[in-house]
Amino acid sequence: MTEACASCGLAVAGSTAGCQRLFESIGLREYEDMRFARYHRIAVDVYAMQHPDRYGRSAKSFAAHLTGLCAWLENESTAQSVNAAVQRWLSGPSPIQKPTLPPTYGAITIRDLVDAEDPVRYGEVLRRWARATWDAYAPLHATAREWIASAQGR
Ligand SMILES: [Zn+2]
C-alpha cells in the first residue's frame, strides 16, 4: 500500500519504513560502486535533514548534518575539512540548542536519487536534492554558518 513518508512526504509502499528502505538501497549502491561512493556523506546529510526526527534527534547530530549540507553546497572541495572541524567542535562541550524545524523539507526526495542510475545524472540529482532541502531550511542558514564559524574558531 502506497502511503506518504511521515517526514519527507514521499508516496511510497510502506510509507516511512519504505522511504527508509530506499535510503538503505542508496547506501548500498554508494558502498558497492566507487562511482557513487564520493557522494555518501552528502547523501546522508540531505536524507537526515529530510528526516530529522530520526537522524537529527539530538542537537549535535542535527548540527552535524545541517552544517554538512551547508558546507558541501557552499564549497564541495573544502566540505571535508569543514566537517572534520565541526566534528571536533561537537565532540567538546559545544553549547548548541536544536532549533525549530521548518514545516516541509523540499519537493525532491530520495526517490529521485534512486531513479538516477547513471553516476553523472546521480550527481546532478543529488545537487538539486541538496539545494531544495537546504532552501527549505532557509530560516536556519545563518545558524548553520554560525556553527561552522564557531567550529573553525572564527
Ligand atoms: Zn521520507
Image (tube, rainbow, N blue to C red):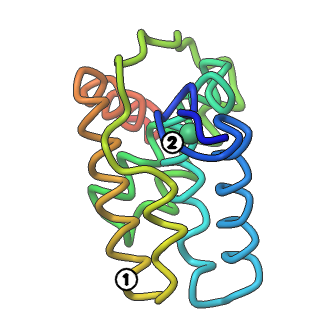
Which residue is more in the foreground, 61 or 135?
135
- The quarter of the rendering in which ligand 1 is drawn is top right
Q: Locate residue 89: give its quadrant.
A: top right
Q: Is residue 96 above or below residue 8?
A: above
Question: Is 116 positioned to the left or the right of 43 in the image?
Answer: left
Nearer the camera: disc 1 or disc 2: 2
Residue 114 vertical position relative to residue 48 in the rendered view, above or below = below
In the image, the residue with mark 1 has its CB under 8 Å from the nearest atom of ligand 1 = no
Instruction: Confirm or reject: label 2 Cβ below 8 Å from ligand 1.
Output: no
Gap in angstroms between the C-alphas marked 1 and 2: 22 Å
The residue that label 2 is drawn on is 11
Judging from the image, what secondary structure is the residue with disc 2 in? Answer: strand
Residue 14 in the image, given as x and y percentages of width and height: 71, 40
Quadrant in which the N terminus appears:
top right
In percent of the image, x 53 and y 33: which residue is there?
4
Instruction: Tell me where residue 73 sits by quadrant.
Output: bottom left
77 displayed left or right of 23: left
Left or right: where does residue 44 sit relative to residue 121? Answer: right
Q: Position of residue 125 (x, y in %)?
A: 36, 69
Secondary structure beneath label 1: helix
Q: Camera-side residue: 34 or 85? A: 34
Q: Amino acid at mark 2?
A: Ala
- Residue drawn at (44%, 50%), measured in percent from left and top? 109
Kind of residue sitting beneath label 1? Arg
Tag count in the figure?
A: 2
Residue linked to disc 1: 121
Instruction: Name the residue rendered at 62%, 27% in the picture.
Output: 56
First-in-chain label (1 vs 2): 2
Crowding near the residue tagged with mark 1, few <14, some 14–19, many ≥20 C-alpha atoms within 10 Å: few
* 93 lies left or right of 119: right
- The crowding category of the residue bearing disc 2, from other C-alpha atoms within 10 Å (few below 14, some 14 to 19, many at least 20), is some
- Residue 9: percent from left, percent from top: 46, 34
